[in-house]
Amino acid sequence: MKRLIAAGILLVLVIACNAYSTKAIVGICDHAIALAEQAQEEKIGGQDPSDTLYNLKYNWEKDGVLLSLFVNHTLLLETEQEIETLFYSSQNGEDDLFPEHFFRLKSMLFQIEESARLTWKSVS
């Protein structure tokens, strides 16, 4: 009986930690997606999105430490590289591939969100 109680407490603790980490990862990704969309709207409107992309880059570097505990490192590095590409291309005035980079960045962020979610398929 003592083992069942200990196992139940451990199960509740694991579920709570998973819920917290998933909420944090989704929050970070949602904030990054919002900043990316804001930068895209600024670019479409003819404004300079450098400040918004700098904020995105800074926040991603700051929050990347938390993400590195839970998310595939290759995907994190590719996402960080895509953010830096957007940031430096906006500073240099390279507008040709902007829409493609925004699309790839958003798809990577959605992929990070999906990989963090615990589903029945990932459990079995």
Image (cartoon, rainbow, N blue to C red):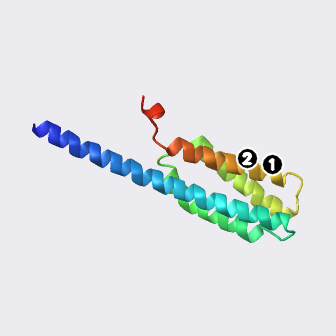
Q: Residue at x 49, y 44 (%)?
A: 117
Residue 60 visible? The answer is no
**Could you say where residue 35 lies in the image, as x and y percent from the top left?**
67, 63
Amino acid marked by disc 1: Glu
Image quadrant assignment for residue 89 = bottom right
Which residue is drawn at the image coordinates 63% and 65% (left, top)?
Answer: 58
112 left or right of 69?
Answer: right
Q: Which residue is mark 2?
A: 104
Residue 27 lies left or right of residue 58; in this view the side is: left
Q: Amino acid at mark 2?
A: Arg
Residue 88 x %, y %: 78, 60
Q: Is residue 20 visible?
A: yes
Q: Residue furthest left?
A: 1
Q: Is residue 117 left or right of residue 95?
A: left
Q: Residue furthest top?
A: 124
Quadrant showing the C terminus? top left
Under tag 1, what secondary structure?
A: helix
Residue 100 image label: 1
- State yes or no: discs 2 and 1 in contact (Cβ < 8 Å): yes
Depicted 122 relative to depicted 52: above or below: above
- Crowding around mark 2 (Cα neighbors within 10 Å: few <14, some 14 to 19, many 20+) is some
Vertical side of 21 occupied by 75: above or below: above
Query: Which picture quadrant has residue 38?
Result: bottom right
* Quarter of the image with the N terminus in it: top left
From the top left corner, tell me how far across and down residue 4 is, in percent: 16, 37
On screen, residue 20 above or below 35? above
Q: Residue 8: where, in percent of width, then height? A: 22, 42
Q: Which mark is residue 28?
A: none
Q: Few, some or many C-alpha atoms within 10 Å of disc 1 (few <14, some 14-19, many ≥20)?
A: few
